[in-house]
Amino acid sequence: MDDAPVPANRHTAAELCDLPARELCRLMSRRDLSPVELMRACLARIEAVEPAVNALAATDFERALAQAREAEDRLMHGRASGLLHGLPLGVKDLQDTAGLLTTHGNIRWRAHVPEADASLVARLRAAGAIVTAKTNVPDMGAGANTRNPVWGATGNPFAPMLNAGGSSGGSAAALATGMLPLCTGSDTGGSLRIPAALCGVVGFRPSPGLIGYEARALGWSPLSVLGPMGRDVADTALMMAANVGAHPLDPISRAIDPNLFLGTAPVDPHELRVGWTADFGVCAVAPEIRRAFRARVDAVGRIARVCEPVAFTWGDEVHRAFDVLRAESFLAGFADAAASGEQTLSPNVRANLEIARGMTLQDRAQAHLVQTRMARDLARVFERFDLLIAPVSPLTPFPWTTLYATEVDGHTMRNYYEWLALTYVVTLATPPALSLPCGRDECGMPFGLQMIGPLYGDARLLSIAQAFETAWAADPRLARPRPDLTRLRDPQPSLKALVTHPPG
């Protein structure tokens, strides 16, 4: 390739921020768009809307611009570095970034600057992505309301005084507002799917082991995974291709061909067999969410070859199983801090540790028996169906000032995370699952449709989700909703109200 400069592109800065990530990659690969121009467009969007939603934690704008210039130089000399070359990237503030604050939203870590990237971040940098900012999380990632004493709260892009979900809430809000084209996430009980649903983007929880995760304290546990987030399914699949791979320090990770997630054969939704459940027989769901979900079931039924209800016989033992396995993982991750009497642990983390203290080996054995049965039950479902659908969240977004939902449809929640049961029962059974933005609920807020596939059928699940996304793209009742950015012109100082110590 010659050394001719990258020509000016034909899109305005605002248009660039709303283009799909894969289209931005295509424009840059053809030298129709400069990585510097794209970075400046994203920084301008951040300046315009970030004060209204507070989605970002630490930022790295100066270094990001320098790296964008290097990316442009490599393009000019035919040395593009990978699938995501030149794309600005948001990294969840639970994942280490070399030379950039990683606080976990916790005051103990408010000055923590890692020396090395987490393996996920290193892999994305190697694919050409440019780390531009960290995205906000709940304190230590515990809970589905993104608020903490270091950075404050993240507001929902559709109504900033409402909850953006969590724990990947900053990533979801940054994507929905066009501040960044791709963001990272992670998921234990729903932390990719819940914020994606509440903010109107895609969050994908992969099968355990597809993305090497060396930082997981319990290396053999499938409970916590890393995953990609994008504004649509194809962008999410692109990021998945750049994410996947084994890691020598992750005993359940596995090698997988990234090309499985690129250019897969299109799926004909008319040939699909789809099963559905509104509650898995054991989850509390608000009536308005049930009605919204039923409308989506009807929409699926108008397309799919088969669309039938699936009966689950799970009982309260699934909640107890998640209590035990979640508490076990928190005890493994925070035992030293708890033993030392560490006072900076968030109330949610302390709640998990308190649950753990009352558990026995019999509890742990029973939890694993329940989890095994759930996985086998779901495997039998996929002998009959290609796809299982359910709601993601049992509630429309509530105010971020409410730490968590204490009641759903008249049922009192036992702890801060039981309202997430629609996603954590899927976590327990271990299949891949994503949240597909699917219109709005009765309150005018985004509705996320949970799409679940068989274990290690991740590429096929993404293809199926894309098929429905395409089929519904022209229907405003079912297509991805977009926030009105003109309503995000005014800063929301109250989102910073929780900050007690400035980072740095």
Image (cartoon, helix red, strand yellow):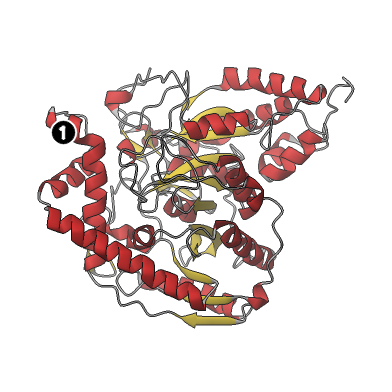
Q: Name the spot of residue 421 as percent of width and height, x first.
A: 32, 61
Closer-to-camera residue (467/285):
467
Q: Is residue 107 above or below residue 260?
A: above
Q: Is residue 264 above or below residue 240?
A: below
* Residue at image location 90% in from the left, 22% down from the top: 2
Q: Residues within 10 Å of mark 1 (few under 14, many from 20)?
A: some
Q: Name the spot of residue 113 as percent of width and height, x first.
A: 40, 19
* Residue at image location 70% in from the left, 19% down from the top: 70
The amino acid at mark 1 is: Ala
Closer-to-camera residue (328/144):
328
Circle 1 — which element? helix
- Which quarter of the rendered picture does the N terminus lie within? top right
* Residue at image location 49% in from the left, 52% down from the top: 206
Picture quadrant where residue 5 is located:
top right
Which residue carries the number 1 mark? 338
Left or right of 337? Residue 208 is: right
Question: What is the total number of numbered labels drawn onto the structure image?
Answer: 1
Closer-to-camera residue (503/238):
238
Q: Name the spot of residue 121 as percent of width and height, x first.
A: 51, 31
